[in-house]
């Protein structure tokens, strides 16, 4: 029994398909931006999620003006995208700041969920009393 692995055939990548090809060219090649496929119901749900996430991130910044400006920039970008409008420039640092604020909320929640050995001892004494 052979344990040899057959070599993979290399596939040539064709950026722009031939005219008779069933493949559609990517929108960046044709210059035609993709159409929105967001239904009104989905847009409403995404807006609710955007509002909730923005509110939560703002609270988790502890009033830091720089962080709140970054979060607001991300909000404006997503809000414009959902409305089908031209989106403002968005700095990747603003996205990372927003993500970090939201992740800090998860981290705080996980820390509260952990039980410290001293807490267990106090709980057992309270139950025994």
Image (cartoon, grey):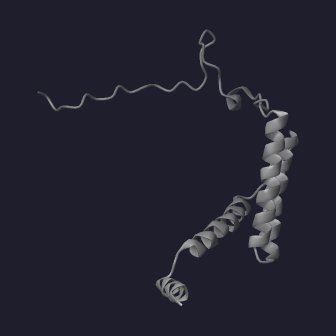
Residue at figure coordinates x 72%, y 26% from the top left: 30
Residue at figure coordinates x 46%, y 25% from the top left: 12
Which residue is outermost to the front? 129
Q: Quadrant of residue 91?
A: bottom right
Where residue 69 sits: x, y (%)?
82, 67
Is residue 89 in view?
no
From the viewer's side, name the closer residue of 9 and 111: 111
Where residue 128 sits: x, y (%)?
50, 87
Query: Is residue 106 shown above or below 74?
Result: below
Q: Is residue 129 left or right of residue 31?
A: left
Where residue 57 sits: x, y (%)?
75, 65
From the viewer's side, name the closer residue of 88 and 36: 36
Residue at figure coordinates x 81%, y 77% from the top left: 63
Where residue 38 sits: x, y (%)?
79, 34
Q: How many marks?
A: 0
Instruction: Quadrant for the N terminus, please.
Output: top left
Query: Is residue 92 shown above or below 108?
Result: above
């Amino acid at each position: 029994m052979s344990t040899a692995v057959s070599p993979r055939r290399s596939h040539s990548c064709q950026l722009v398909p031939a005219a008779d090809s069933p493949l559609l060219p990517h929108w960046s090649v044709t210059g035609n931006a993709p159409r929105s496929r967001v239904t009104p119901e989905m847009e409403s749900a995404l807006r609710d999620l955007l509002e909730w996430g923005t509110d939560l991130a703002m609270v988790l910044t502890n009033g830091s003006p720089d962080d709140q400006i970054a979060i607001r920039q991300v909000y404006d970008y997503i809000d414009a995208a959902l409305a089908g409008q031209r989106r403002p420039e968005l700095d990747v640092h603003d996205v990372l700041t927003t993500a970090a604020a939201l992740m800090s909320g998860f981290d705080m929640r996980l820390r509260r969920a952990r039980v410290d050995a001293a807490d267990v001892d106090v709980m057992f004494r309270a139950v025994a009393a």
